[in-house]
Amino acid sequence: MSEKWKKISVYEITDNPFKLIGSDWMLITAGSIENWNTMTASWGGLGVLWNKEVSFCFIRPSRYTRSFMDKADYYTLSFFNEKYRDILNFCGSHSGRSVDKSKETGLSPVEMDSYTVSFREARLVLICKKIYFCDLKPENFLDISIEKNYPHKDYHRLFIGEIIKCLASD
């Protein structure tokens, strides 16, 4: 792990979570340093569930990262400064099936505690251990207008992860 980060408590995160995820975006990454994938996301959240600090994120079945998330026990959420917006756009619009995202963007993958991957350029990294998942079901939507988000019926899988480590850049 890089000397760039220091371990902090999740309670020391000063970012507004709505801006952090919804506006600034994040990279969701799963896999090993030898075989990983990442994707940009702007849906998800942070909170407390089952007496644990958790993250939750949503991934469609068509996303390459989904296969990595399904297999992995851990994943990271990585947050960046605004100067990385083009890279986040690239990682959200190009599949790791067909491009090497680190080569194309210049991102530097870093092994995190021997179980997952983040990027040296991140300013905030949450290392999460998967503790639950479920597939969203159309019959459970109480607001039918939500269906406009699923014209292809490709409903997300929800992943909940216990945040086991929070790292912030100096």
Image (cartoon, helix red, strand yellow):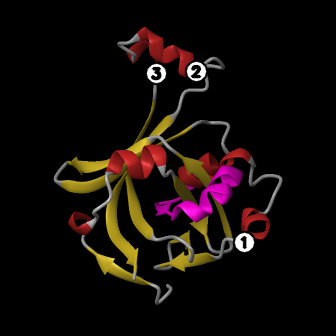
Would you say the residues marked 3 and 2 are in contact, meaning their CB atoms lie under 8 Å apart? Answer: no
The CA distance from mark 3 to mark 2 is 11 Å
**Residue at the spot x=55%, y=16% of the render?**
148
Which span is picked out in magenta?
71-91
**Residue at the spot x=48%, y=62% of the render?**
79
Left or right placement of residue 115 versus residue 151 in this view? left
- Name the kind of residue labelled 3 in the image: Lys
Question: Which residue of the protein is positioned furthest toward the top in this rendering?
Answer: 144
Q: In the rendered image, which residue does mark 3 sit on?
A: 137
Residue 40 screen position, x and y as percent: 59, 50
Query: 10 Å neighbourhood of mark 3: few (<14), some, or many (≥20)?
Result: few
**Residue at the spot x=34%, y=70% of the render?**
166
Residue 94 screen position, x and y as percent: 75, 49
Left or right placement of residue 45 versus residue 71 in this view? left
The CA distance from mark 1 to mark 3 is 38 Å
Residue 82 lies within the magenta run: yes
